[in-house]
Amino acid sequence: MKSQYRVVVIGGGVVGASVLYHLAKFGWSDVVMLERRRLASGSSWHAAGGIHALNADPNMASLQAYTIDLLSEIEKESGQNIGLHMTGGLTLAGTPERWEWLQANYRIFQSIGIDDCELLSPEEAQKRCPIMSTDGVLGAMWADREGYIDTTGTVQAYATAAKKRGAEYYEETKVEELVQTDDGWQVVTDKGTISCEHVVNAAGLWAKQVGRMAGVELPVSPLKHHYLITDTVPEVAQADFEMPMTVDLEGFTYMRQDQKGVLVGIYEVDHEHWAMGGAPWNYGEELFQEQLDRIENELTLGFERYPSIQNVGIKTWVNGAFTFSPDGNPLVGPVPGKRGYWTACAVMAGFLQGGGVGKTLAEWMIHGEPEADAWPMDVARYGGFAQNKRYIRETTGQFYSRRFVMTYPNEQLPAGRPLKMAPAHDAMTEAGCKWGVSWDLEVPLYFAPKGFEETPTLKRSNAHEIVAEECRTIREGVGLMDISGFSRFEVSGPNVEAWLDNVMASKLPGPGRAKLAPMLGEDGRLKGDLTVLNWGDGTWWIMGSYYLRAWHMRWFDDHMVDGVNIRDLGEEYCGFAVVGPKSQAVVEKLAEQDISDLKFMGCGDFDIGLVRARVARMSVTGEKGYEINCRYGDHIKLRRILLEAGAEEGIRECGFNAMLSTRLEKSFGIWSAEFTQAYTPGMTGMDRWIDWGKDFVGKEGALAERDGNGPAQVQATLEIDALDADASGYEPIWANGERVGFVTSGGYGHYIGKSLAMALIDRDKAEPGTELSVHVVGVERPARVIVPSPYDPQGKAMRG
């Protein structure tokens, strides 16, 4: 072991070994992996080793598909047998809603290029898995590339393949301390100290302690997980093929063949945490006693689903610990504020996702950006609030218990909530507000009569008409909308204008003006759809999506220069938007200055009654509107006086659901849908805001797209002949049976009375009038490309 490496990977499980392998594969061979005990100790050795394609998150499904493809490659490259059994797999649906969801997801898989799936009847499913009962099964989805592997052999294969490419790994080497230096990190081990530029926390069950060594409190916790292995099952032994990997969603179980018996794993509703502060250092290859009382219900369902195992013995019980994040996705990437410190942990499905995690992190470290959009597993999707132990306990437990429970798009889950609330939260709740959550903050969805409860559904809900009324208020009268859920960064200093001009691709606004500003990554892909405001007093604001606060701050810090100060105002400022044709009439009653002087995209300081506010004349609804930003302490007063001033105009409080409907009617894109870091300015139409005459981050990549052949797909707006459901995202779009694109977001345009979607479509199919079709909740519906901004295409309403 040398005293200096470029990268030290801490943890010799499947994730650490994959990171080591990908770093070496992509050209960084001066890397080492340190394992405190033996390779695959911790969670890897006792994992069930299942691999399957289905994931409700398309980005994670793509990650899993990459890992599955990689497995045979590392087996060949390493010469290590990984025990790959590609049996194919079934996912069973046992309720009408679940069967509907499975059909919808089958179509979404087509959108992301996973084409080896098919839908089956219960009888067809039983032919593939003859030991299962079809009682209660309404249908199933089959995927070719599902099965299982030998877990220890797979870890050895990753590590051996990495070693063949020049990397090193050492077992029985415990990391005891991390020290940050000017050049990187010192890794203090029981075998000596190593200097390095980068440290990767792939410590699995010990990720918490390795995080704390760097002053980082990661939102992870181990939970116990059961599976059993039976003795020989006669029906299995007599079959001339292997039983497929089978997931029974309503039964909370998964099953695969194990020799001549079967393995049945359980995601019990009655979850149990273990060692929330991290596993003991002397823990490694131990298991817990099985807890039959805790898994009795799910175990019964499993034995009913596979009747043939009722008459055989249980050879092995496994009750072991796996590490989970609050949403179940991995925590990957550079930790904000800790240069050179990377995470690759909380990968609870390590053998299914580990290959993709290793690839993503290696690309990120070497090239500055991963090839695919890494947001679903980016460690920066959580902020300081997620360090709270109760938050971690509630959210990780909720995820575990709901692992196979269906969650609807309009369903609000309770764990870790409510946490942060705008000051007027209680008054708004009394007024009927129904809340969602963005990051740590409660955000208003809509305002309903007392006693109203929304029904979870894949289709239009019973809140449909409530949102419609709010949309009509915005279009015809005046709506009041809490905008605490916008991010706000204050930027100042002698070099602020030059810095902003470099990190933003657009022209900067003049004093007292605001401007839409695309921000690009080094490769020319999108990094933000932001608004820059020049207050004219030497201070500037950057406004964007609230849940991206830590993600954007990491980007700003990574590109910071002397003479610039940036401050996240998310704990200091909040506010309200007043929107609609009567908005000026309301605001001018309160403004001490002449609000009519504030033109579209203008901004300035105003006295709104007793509240000193920073006001911008803009609105994402496409109507005339004013965003009134105030201190947190003024939020209650601001709401009160705006409601009083707007009483004669019929002011009504509205929520984000109405905002999303009205923005669709204007073809306004949003982040995580139309705009992601996987897309380019040309694909999304953001290139129209670029100032090509200046230098900016990402210009070379953006120019290559502009001056080359252009993007293969571009953004378009669709009108869909929908019935009782609307597109939401990733549904495939068809032209004469050929897949030509996918929906980025969709919903109902309440004011124009049409089902709308925004989509990325092949350029030659993006012309208005092109007839297409879209699968909506699994049902193919006619659709057509329409001219963008079906409501007020000239933008006269918002310009006033």
Image: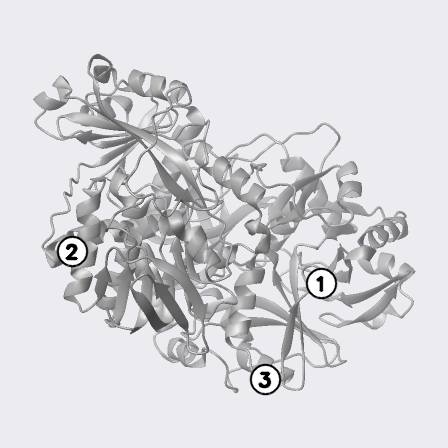
Question: Please, what secondary structure does the residue beneath circle 2 have?
Answer: helix
- Residue behind mark 2: 73
Q: Quadrant of residue 304?
A: top left
Question: Of marks 3 and 1, which one's residue comes earlier in the chain?
Answer: 3
**Residue receiving disc 3:** 562
Q: Is residue 269 above or below residue 162?
A: above
Q: CA distance from mark 3 to mark 1?
A: 39 Å
Distance between the Cα atoms at labels 1 and 2? 56 Å
Q: Give 771 or 212, whichever is nearer the viewer.
A: 212
Image quarter where the N terminus lies is bottom left
Crowd class of label 1 (few under 14; some 14 to 19; many from 20; radius 10 Å): many
CB within 8 Å, label 3 to label 2: no
- Residue 402 seen from this side: no
In this rendering, position of residue 603 left or right of residue 268: right
Q: Which sits earlier in the primary sequence, circle 1 or circle 2?
A: 2
Q: Tag on residue 127?
A: none
Kind of residue at badge 3: Asp
Q: Residues within 10 Å of mark 3 (few under 14, many from 20)?
A: few
Between disc 3 and disc 2, whose residue precedes? 2
